Amino acid sequence: MSSTKNLAECSLDRRAPLCWVKQMVPLADSVRLATDIYFPALDGERLPGAFPVILFRTPYSRKSILENALFFARHDFVVVSQDVRGRYESEGVFRPYQEEAADGCACISWIKQQKWCNGRIGTMGSSYCAALQTAAACLNPPGLSTMIVTVGPHSSYHSSMRHNGALEQRFLVFAFSMAASSKEAAADPKLAAVFNQAKEHVWDYLRSGPIRKGSTPLSLLPHYEQFAIDISTHARYDEFWQQPGFGLRPYLDQLPNIPTLYVGGWYDTYTRATFENLLEHGCRQTAPVHAIVGPWIHGGVGGQYAGDADFGPEAGKNMQEISRQWFCQWLKDEDHGLNVRRKIDYFLMGQARGGSRTPIYRGGTWCSSSSWPPPGCRSTTFFLHPEGLLSSTRPTDPDGKSSFLFDPAHPVPTIGGNLSAMPLPGGAFQQIDDPRFLGSGDGLPLSARNDILCFYSEPLKRDLVLTGAIKAHLFVSTSAADTDFTVKLLDLCPPDEDAPGGLAVNISDSIFRLRFRQGYDQEVPAQPGKIYEIEFELYPSACIFAKGHRLRVDVSSSNYPRFDVNPNSGEPLGQHRLSRKAINTIHLNAKHPSGIILSVLYEKGKS
């Protein structure tokens, strides 16, 4: 049975791969990385010859990808699975993201030299493992032929670890959880107990103030502690953030011209990054750059649920089979119809209503486009008015404004949204205080809070189809030296049989730290009472606001614990000790027309 056709007809049991366990791959500095290699086999014998290779690198144990490794090896790929430096059985010290470019490039070079490699190498992986791929690609290693980058960063500073100047606290949670699973903890049960206890009390540590040297058990692993301090205190977009492990943004012109598939979700933490990679990478090369974006959360790519919302079975995708076809096209020259320069498959989230099995049923349908946003979209501004109205009509009031008191000691709780790496559920939720979320649980709607300004559209006369970018354009002032402004877009659903009180469902949100209004390379204190114009991105989306529904925009100054709470003191970020209340104001008048800008798809009978 030497032909490809006959091999493909063999039972999967006869095709069980063979594995070389724990090969120690050397690096230039003599550190060795633990690596498993899975070979195509037949009846217990390794198949002869050279094959295309798929590389997984991970900080979460190379054994965790066993199912994928066996699947692809059965389809005549050699699969290489590797623990990154300092994790599990690999040697060296783990410094998150900072040495991954050189290590990944060295691994690809090593693979290319092996007799079982035919010179064509693909990479895949999600989240941290997506960052590993793009980090190596920034160095353009010979042999790298294609990538499948699932929920990965574009720039960790702009939209991942930090976000429009604020800190995404999930990466502080990440530091605690990674310390608990470190090889140092695995080797010392008493140390493991310390880190597991710290992990259980992570919210207490984060509430108590910035992480300082020696202030938490992370000090027992100084390289983990330093990572937490670095991402907290490198507040500007400096050289630290321009290392390739933190995203490909500074290296776009150096990337190899190879087919690349970006995979993301509307409720993932990397939604912005997925589209930034698609557009910025795609415009610079001739090889195909595609994207698949579903209604998914960070850990639920390919599924039909996101938080309390059910998007129906059509939302599901067999990502393993999609990946197989992608690699067969670009590593084996099989034709799976993917030779299109630009393509995005995106899930248009449908009309929200109460669900019989979940609190929210949304449904939806898959769409395809060769551009983003799709043809027919126009930027449409909905203006905020003093009486809480949201309208496409510009305000005419000569001095309208709305103010609220922002108390850092009582932040607005995070209720779903684009979350990951923290013990809170992400996705779509009714926006009420909910015991599943930190600092929440009294059951009142968020709209009842005095520190949230809510703006409502009239009931829609026809469906409004949002497809693309969402931006906040605000005129603001504050009584503090620094503060934050948050914006959230919601779909208000009228009462129905399964939701007799109606629904307020989160679609997208974001935050902006005022000290960065002149750019992320400088921090400028605010002058109390002075009006500033700011514009910042929310996460892009694609959804239908149904006829009879209303849009709602919430404006406030916190979203905790997703983002760190601004103490309003103007002190250096990650080092503050003071905190004070601030009176924050949104200006809503003819001279200062604050609003939200939506990419609306205009079709016959819609929008």
Image: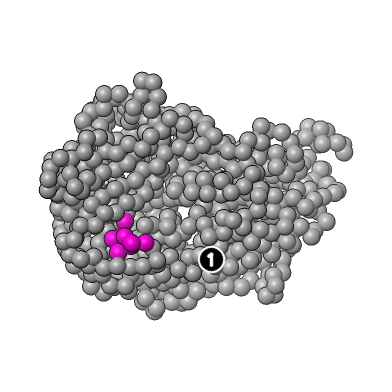
Given the current orientation, which residue lies at the most extreme right position? 2
Q: Position of residue 398 (x, y in %)?
A: 12, 45
Q: Position of residue 326 (x, y in %)?
A: 65, 40
Can residue 462 be spotted in the picture?
A: yes
Compared to residue 96, the image places residue 51 above or below, namely above
Towards the viewer: 51 or 404: 404
Does the magenta segment cover residue 514? yes
Towards the viewer: 155 or 206: 155
Residue 496 occupies quadrant: top left
Q: Which residue is at 29% across, 54% downward?
A: 534
What are the residue bounds of the magenta stretch?
512-519
Q: Which residue is at 25% across, 62% downward?
A: 483
- Mark 1: secondary structure: loop
Instruction: Indicate left or right for 276 with 388 as reference.
Output: right
Q: Residue tagged by mark 1?
A: 243
Amino acid residing under circle 1: Gln
Compared to residue 414, the image places residue 408 above or below, namely below
Q: Position of residue 442 (x, y in %)?
A: 20, 48
Q: Position of residue 416 (x, y in %)?
A: 34, 46
Q: Quadrant of the C terminus?
A: top left
Can residue 313 be spotted in the picture?
A: no
Compared to residue 36, the image places residue 468 above or below, namely above
Instruction: Indicate left or right for 324 with 43 as reference.
Output: left
Q: Which residue is at 33% across, 58% downward?
A: 563
Q: Which residue is at 73% across, 61% downward?
A: 109
Q: Residues within 10 Å of mark 1 (few under 14, many from 20)?
A: many
